[in-house]
Every structure is written in structure tokens, then in C-alpha cells.
Image (cartoon, rainbow, N blue to C red):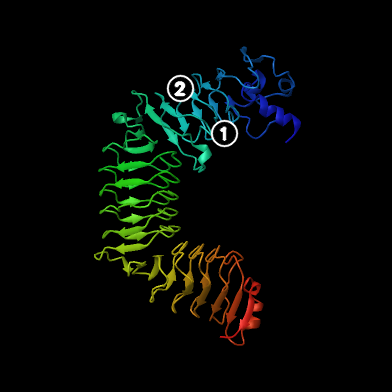
Amino acid sequence: MTYFAILACSVLSAVFTTEDSYHNISHSLSIYDNYMSDSLSISKDIIRRSLSEPVIINGNFIKRVGLYTQKYSIPKGVDKICKGSLMDMCRIDTLIITEGVKCIEERSICVKDKVFLPNSLLTLSADAFWESGLTSLEIPLGVCSITYSGVTSQDTRPGWEFLSVHENNAYYDSRNDCNAVICSASGTLIMGCRNTIIPESVTEIGRLSFSYCQKLKNIIVPKGVHVIADSAFLRCYDLVRVVLSDDIEYIADEAFSCCWSLSKIRMPMQLKEIGYGAFAGCSLTTIRIPENVTKIGEMAFSGNSKLKKIVVDKKNDCYKSFHGKAVVETGTRSLIVMRGKRVPSGITRIASGASSQNNEIHQLVIPEGVISIGREAFCSCSQLQKVIIPETLSLIDEYAFGLCYHLKDVYNYSTIPQQINENVFSVYGVLHVKNGYKDVYLNANNWNRFTIIDDL
């Protein structure tokens, strides 16, 4: 970073626009990408000023207090706060956003303690308050659109404790003092926090609504809720207790992904679909799939290293369990999730993440008839030492045996080397192939990383 750019960063907390450059940026406050361009919010002559000098912005004086101000108001005339505009205000105690601002974009504000939003505000990104120390937020009267950018980083979400909505807002509400933001028309909960009590009138837990929620330990999803949307509780690391009502029909992609402390959950009786990675990276010990489930996404239970028992309701026509250790989709004969030491016979494919972090396997025998192994299927199986691959296998996806650092021997009975990339295996020990096929594998990309013996 140039010398001037460093200085620009150091004065951001008090200087945002000059009168000339303010008009050049179409009434938007943005200095994210172009510190030294002609249309800067901070001009070179302001950068060169002594930090102890007050700076004139649109006729208003801002008194510097050391390198940071304790309280700052956005200049009048600004109608949009763009991404990155106020990211360097982390030591500002209070930010007052004046009337006239209509839009606040994602990752635009970093403030230490308090922010006051104007009633003129129409559009707010739920990811606006980047790395802020805020604990409470009130959605103003005029807000009609709250969006998520899809940014999924713990640093982007404040540790909300209290959420509320202006009582006269026509689009959102915080009914029953629930400490949440709810779309009034649809009943979808948009934003939640560690103290949220979900009202029974809510119909959906919205996308990313509780994601990265710090210190959220317990949540009760009441009757009336039918959908838990994508990433709703993503990376709620402290979540230990979840109560789901039987009305829930859909648990979407990554809904509870990486909830490390979650060791048990009762699936709703009316549940129909479990999305991709819905419970990946949890600490579940037992899984019970109800009668009405017709779809389980890949990676749904991957990375549950403590998983011991998997049971499917006997009345379920789409999935079957084998000895409480595996779940197979009956139509496609795909292995969806597995624990224990043995892959069930009769399957044709092994789904992504099906047996990742399965520390019971020492020797893995892939049954004859299996044609594909999905991504990360046996990733991080820390005790795996030996793999036997049948002649029928034609596809091994990336990271299928990644991070299996004790894997020493691979026995491959196929006469045609499977196309694999460099990420399928993390270690390359001894590859055993059929007599006369050593040269074939020596000329096969990535298989030739092994020490090859034709002794089968």
C-alpha cells in the first residue's frame, strides 16, 4: 500500500467527502477501492493536512480527537453509504446517520458501540455492520427492504443481543417483543439474535437469519414454521439445544452446518426434505430419519465424527437403513451416510461426504457394482490404512480420500485407470494393480504418484 493510501486509511474516521468530490460520486459515500482517484471522497490536500487540524466538510467542522472521533454524524446530502465506506471507524463510539440516507450496502460500516439509523432509510443490508461491536439495532420506520449479501464470515456479523422494529414500519415488525425482525407480509423471520423467542405466527426461518449468531445456545422453533431456509443457523458454534416442531417440512441447504456443539436433534415428523450439508460438521451421535422424508441432500451429515447410530423409519419408501450404520436411497441405490467399518453391498454409488470423519474404518472394501465415489466421501478418516477398489469403479471425485494420512495401500482391480485429480488422495503410498497393468498406471495422471506393484 502506498504512503498516501496508508494516510487515507488513518483519517477515514473523520473525513469522508469534500464538497467537489461529493458531487463527483453521485451523492454516494464510497472510498472502498480507489483511494487516490480523481473522484475520491478524500482529496490529496486533505490527506496532507495535520491530523490535529479540524477538517471542513460541506461547511461543517469536524474536530479530530487524536486519530479517532468519539461521535460522528454523516454529512447532510449523502443518500447512499456504499460498501467499504465506513470500514475504518472501529473506534468510533457512536455513528449518527442523518436523514436523507436511503441505502446502506453490505460491509459498509464498522462502529464500536452505537449507530442511529434515519427514518429516510429504505434499503438495508443485514451485513452492513462489518466487524462492528454493536449489540442492539432498531429498524427504522421507512425500511422496506432488508437483504443479505451472502457474505459468510464471523467477523461480518455483530453479536446482536436485541433487535427491534419501529412500531409504525409497514413492512417489518418485531411482534411480541421477540427480539427478531420479521417480514410482516410473509411471516418470515429475517434477522434473529441470541435472545430471540420465535413467535408461533412465524412461517419460515429465513436465509442466514441466525448465521454466526454468537452465544446462541438454545432455540425453539414453534408450531406454524414450515421451512428452515438456507444457512439459517450456519456456524452457530455455541448452539447445544434445538427443538423443532413437527410442522417443519423443509430443512434447507446448510441450515445447521458447522454447529459444532449440537449433539442431538429430533427430526420433525412431517419433514420431507433435508438439504445439502444441512447438518454437516455437527456433533450428532444419533440420526433418525422420519417416514415422510423423500430427499436427503449430499453432505447432509458429513463430518459428524461422533455419529454412532443412523435409523430410518420402517415406513419410509425412499430410504433404508442397514444395521443402524448406513442410509441408502432405494431408488438410486446410493449410499447417503455411513458409520461403522463396512460399506453395504448392492449399492451403485457413494454420495459426497457419506463417510467423512469415520474413525472406525481401518480397511475399506468398496463392493463390486459401485461405479462412483463422491467428493469427500471418505475424507479425514484418520484410521484408514487400506482401500480396495473394484473393477466396476469408474469415477472418484476430488478429496474422496483427502486427509487420510495413514493410508498406506490402495488395491485397484480396474484395468482402466480412473481419471483422478491431484486432490483425491493426500498421501501416495503403494498402489497394487493387476498383473501386466503396471505400465498403464505409470502413464496415468496422478496414479503415477504411487509406488506401483502389479501383484493382483
Q: Answer yes or no: is residue 38 visible.
A: no
Determine whether 409 is above or below 249 in the image.
Answer: below
Which residue corresponds to the image point at 52% horizontal and 42% vertical from the top-left?
A: 153
Give residue 391's position: percent from left, percent from top.
Answer: 50, 80
Res 165 quadrant in image? top left
Percent of width and height locating residue 439: 66, 82
Q: Nearer the viewer, residue 451 or 436?
A: 451
Find numbered disc 1 in the image and state the secondary structure of the residue it sits on: loop
Q: Going by the image, does 301 lie left or right of 419?
A: left
The residue at 45%/54% (across/down) is 281
Q: Quadrant of residue 29?
A: top right
What residue did someone put label 2 on? 120
Which secondary structure lies at badge 2? loop
**Left or right: where does residue 339 sit relative to residue 419?**
left
**Label 2 neighbourhood size at 10 Å, few (<14), some (14-19), many (20+)?**
some
Sequence-wise, the earlier of marks 1 and 2 is 1
| Residue furthest to the bottom | 435
Eyeballing the image, is 148 above or below 286? above
Which residue has dot 1 on it? 83
- Identity of the amino acid at label 1? Lys
- Snapshot quadrant of residue 317: bottom left
Q: Nearer the viewer, mark 1 or mark 2?
A: 1
Q: Is residue 184 visible?
A: yes
Q: Nearer the viewer, residue 353 or 303?
A: 303
Assess disc 1: are there few (<14), some (14-19) or many (≥20) residues with their C-alpha within 10 Å of its C-alpha: many
Residue 149 spot, x, y in % from top left: 49, 40
Q: Are marks 1 and 2 in contact (CB under 8 Å)?
A: no
Q: Is residue 373 above or below residue 181?
A: below
Q: Callout 2, which amino acid? A: Ser
Quadrant of image for the N terminus:
top right
